[in-house]
Structure formats: C-alpha cells, structure tokens
Amino acid sequence: MKKQELQFDDICSLLDINNSADELYALADEITKETKGNTVNVRGIIEFSNYCNRNCAYCGLNCHNTTLGRYRMSPDEIIETALEASDAGYKTAVLQGGEDPWFTADVFCHIIKEIKSKRDIAITLSAGEMSEEDYAAIRKAGCDRYLLKHETTDKDIYSKLHPGYNIDDRLNCLRTLKRLGFETGGGFMIGLPEQTAKTIANDLLFIKSVPCDMAGIGPFIPHPETPLKGCDSGSTELTRRAVAIARILLPDINLPATTSLGVIDKEERNKVFSGGANVIMKKVTPEKYRKLYEIYPVNHGKIKSVAEERAEINELLASIGKEWD
Ligand code: SAH
C-alpha cells in the first residue's frame, strides 16, 4: 500500500474483513512513526459526574437507567484529582461526565482556571453538547481540548439511538469547537446496530472534513440496563482497521487505543499501538466513584493509587517497545 488520498470506496474495501489488512496496519504504523515518533501520550481521565440528561440507547449512564447510583464530584474534588494526576506525571487531564446541568459553563470555567493556575497541564473537557456561548467561555477560561464523539454520522441510526435528538446539532457542535480554537475530538463506535462499512467510511470522512485533531474510535459494548442489552459487542478487528484508516486520512491526528477496546481484549488494544494509535487514557477518578461511572460493564480489578497506576501504564508501554509522555 502507498500513501495516497483514500476515497470512500477504498475505505469500504479496507474495512472488508475478507481482505487482508497487513499492508494497512504497516502503512498506518509507518505514518505514526513519522508524525508521532515512538511516543504514546498518556492522559488521565477524571469521570466527574454520572448524572445525565440524555437518553443514549447504548450508554449505561442514560437518564432512564434507574438502577444506577448517581454521584457528582465537587469542583474542589475535581481540582484536587487533576493536581494529583499532574503530580503522578500526567500532562493532560480529561474531565468527562454525563450531560449534568449542575455543571454550568461558569462552574467549568472556575475548575479550569483553578487547575491551570496551579499546574502546567492541558485540559480536555468531554461534557456533551453546549451552546456556542458556553463553549467560547470555556475556551477563554483556558480549556485546551474538547472531546465530543459524534457516535455515528448516519441520520437514521443516530435518531434511533438518541430519540428526540438530531445528528446535525452534534456535528455542528464539533464544527463550532474547531472554529473556537479547541483541539477538537470526534469519534464513533464500531458495531452499532444497522451500521455497515459504508457508515464507518462516512464517519471517517466526516472526521477528515472537520478536520478533527483527535478521534476516539472504540467498539460498542452492550450494557445490561439499556435498550441495546441484547446486541453483540463491536468487532475489535474492524476497530483496528478504522483507527489505521484514520491515521492515513489524517497523519497528525491523535488517536487513542480506546478503553472499550481494552475492555473487550487487552491484546487487541496493545496491537493498535502498532497500527495508528498514539494515545491512551487511564482513569484517575477517585476509587469510590469508579464503579458508578458505568458507561458499559467493566471489571475494575484491584484499584491502586493514581501514581501506582500511572507507573503500571508506563511499564505496559515499555513492554510493547513504546516510550511515553
Ligand atoms: N456525555 C459526554 C461523554 C459521553 S461518554 C458526551 O456526550 O460526549 C463517552 C463515550 O463513551 C461516548 O461518546 C461513547 O462513544 C462511549 N460509549 C458510551 N456507551 C458505550 C457503550 N455501551 N459501548 C462503547 N462505548 C460507549
């Protein structure tokens, strides 16, 4: 395979699992080494609230899930956790939560300014759709990046999964974030009901059109308390192919080896670092909240201190021949 402009049909053919992907992965790896070197960026994710107004049919936090105990971290707790992450070596804190109206733009601005005044750490916010005015205020407060996965660009699939919501609003949020100067993160799930290779090709081309600075591409995992509980998980192979294609379409983009890929299969997650990925996110959420941030079921294993867990990630990356930052 040569470096070339991939068109819609090329992408569909690369996503066809009857075709070998060896050359695809090799090219994605070559491009990653050129643009990112051998370094994986490790980001600390703080899951600050599991309250959510939205009804996303795949997500365990959706507002109809009455079985979930809800929590909300206080601004001071969030700030302290970010400082702890910085002290453990993280250079980015990702603040992620449901769409929780308690967290107004003013509250986010306060949190961001406090963290930024105390540590030299990049901040990514991932808190759903907001008005342009709110995004602008958050950007002005010093927020560096915003992660808003578009989930799927297919209108029908989107409206079935998000009754009452519109894909155009979400895509426009991404365009607004980009215009406001955020490093802008889109992304989507692999394995949503009714998704085809064509849907995924459109998702990848949408990311290129923004263009996004980062993209989270992860397999769907069914959650037992959601309407999609009976569906199968997304394919790890297709996920790896989509990540590799994203790297070829956008050589400089930041691409995480997503947590959901690691939840399905750690080996597959590790392989994606030699097929386009250059980022990993690690939870730094205080232990008492971790089990409650259940987007999809996760076996948390033994939870250790933020510093110990960071050391483990560094060891993992060393074991697969990577450096870290
Ligand atoms: N409220 C924020 C954060 C959402 S949760 C927002 O709207 O952006 C973060 C991401 O987890 C989602 O964007 C979605 O892509 C992913 N996710 C949610 N449920 C999932 C599931 N069951 N399987 C895999 N990924 C899921």
Image (cartoon, rainbow, N blue to C red):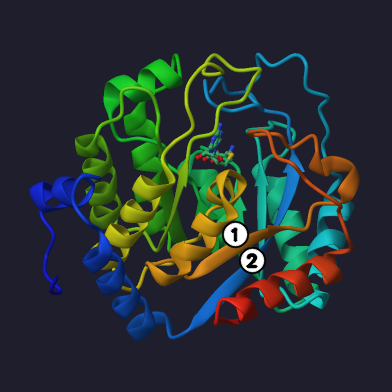
Badge 2: residue crowd in 10 Å (few <14, some 14–19, many ≥20): many
Instruction: Locate residue 205 relative to residue 133 in the image: left or right.
Output: left
Tell me if residue 152 can be seen: yes
Residue 152 placement (x, y as % from top left): 35, 35
Q: Residue at x 30, y 29 (%)?
A: 195
**Foreground residue among 85 and 198:** 198
Q: In the picture, residue 284 is in which quadrant?
A: bottom right
Q: Is residue 59 above or below residue 286?
A: above
Q: Is residue 91 above or below residue 205?
A: below
The answer to whether the residue labelled 1 contacts the one labelled 2, judged by CB atoms less than 8 Å apart, is yes
What residue is pinned by disc 1?
Answer: 124
Q: For marks 1 and 2, give the one nearer the viewer.
A: 2
Residue 248 placement (x, y as % from top left): 25, 66
Residue 312 placement (x, y as % from top left): 76, 70
Q: In the picture, residue 189 is in which quadrant?
A: top left
Amino acid type, label 1: Thr
Amino acid type, label 2: Arg
